[in-house]
Amino acid sequence: QVQLVEPGGGVVQPGGSLRLSCVASEFNLKIFGMYWVRQAPGKGLEWVAFIPYDESNQYYAQSVKGRFSISRDISKNTLYLQVNSVRPEDTAEYFCAKDIRPYGGNGYWSLDLWGRGTRVTVPS
Amino acid sequence: QSALTQPPSVSGSPGQSVTISCTGTSSDVGTYNRVSWYQQPPGTAPKLIIYDVTSRPSGVPDRFSGSKSGNTASLTISGLQAEDEADFYCSSYRSGNTLVFGGGTKLTVL
């Protein structure tokens, strides 16, 4: 079954770090651009980061630039989000998602497969 | 980065049509055709229902349609059904390799 599963998440103290994982099943992560999107409790969706299929660059929302890092391990078909220097406002459900078409060097910016999400809580 | 502007809520009776607007700028909706719409029932992950302004993924009913005029994109749901009740979000590519979402619209089926 084609799916994305995000294990991990949890409670992390302000200023701390956490690595989120997203395991892809039944499709090759290597040929698709991938995204992280988050949703604070009771709030809307917020794009966090994008990595093109060829890893030519990584792109970040201004709110996380310099603190978060998106990466992949192709051998494990897994996407990661390294979250550093966390703040209470980073508390959210974090979703990984896949680009709609393969080989988009600049991204197609439509997310056609989403994981169920993993909760990150940063107490104030 | 400012979100795209959506109405907080819309409602309609079964069988009716509703339209949700999504207003951006010339840096996103007005220039690029990378506009998408997502449906998110409570407690679930978003689901893509429209991409590239007007295209529907396989399996999405043709009751869902998208359009764009200038800086405003729209999602129209015709033949409203009870199971359509959910939050709806638009998104658009924005110049500078970023993605911006709308604030979300809650659809209530009366």
Image: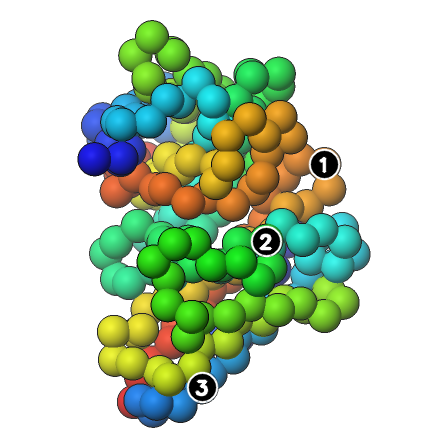
Query: Which residue is at the far top?
Result: A75
The amino acid beneath tag 2 is Asp
Would residue A69 be found to the left or right of residue B31 on screen? Answer: left
Give the quadrant of residue B62.
Answer: bottom left
- In percent of width and height, residue B89 lies at 47, 61
Badges 3 and 1, same chain: yes
Q: Give the SS element for disc 1.
A: loop
Which mark is on residue B96? 1
The amino acid beneath tag 3 is Ser
Q: Earlier in the sequence, mark 2 or mark 3?
A: 3
Callout 3: 10 Å neighbours few (<14), some, many (20+)? Answer: some
Question: Disc 2 and disc 3: Cα gap in Å?
Answer: 22 Å
Question: Disc 1 and disc 2: Cα gap in Å?
Answer: 18 Å
Q: What chain is tagged by disc 2?
A: B
- In percent of width and height, residue A50 lies at 53, 30
- In percent of width and height, residue B16 lies at 40, 90
Give the quadrant of residue A117.
Answer: top left
Q: Which residue is mark 3?
A: B17
Badges 2 and 3, same chain: yes
**Quarter of the image where the N terminus of chain A is located:** top left
- In percent of width and height, residue A68 lies at 48, 24
Q: Give the SS element for disc 2.
A: loop
State the colouring used for the structure image.
Answer: rainbow
Would residue A102 be found to the left or right of residue B13 on screen? Answer: right
Q: Which residue is mark 2?
A: B52
Q: From the viewer's perspective, is residue B44 above or below residue B19?
A: above
Q: What chain is tagged by disc 3?
A: B
Would residue A110 be found to the left or right of residue B23 on screen? Answer: left
Q: Residue at x 34, y 90 (%)?
A: B15
Question: Disc 3 and disc 1: Cα gap in Å?
Answer: 36 Å
Give the quadrant of residue B91.
Answer: bottom right
The residue lying toward the viewer, choosing from A110 and A88, is A110
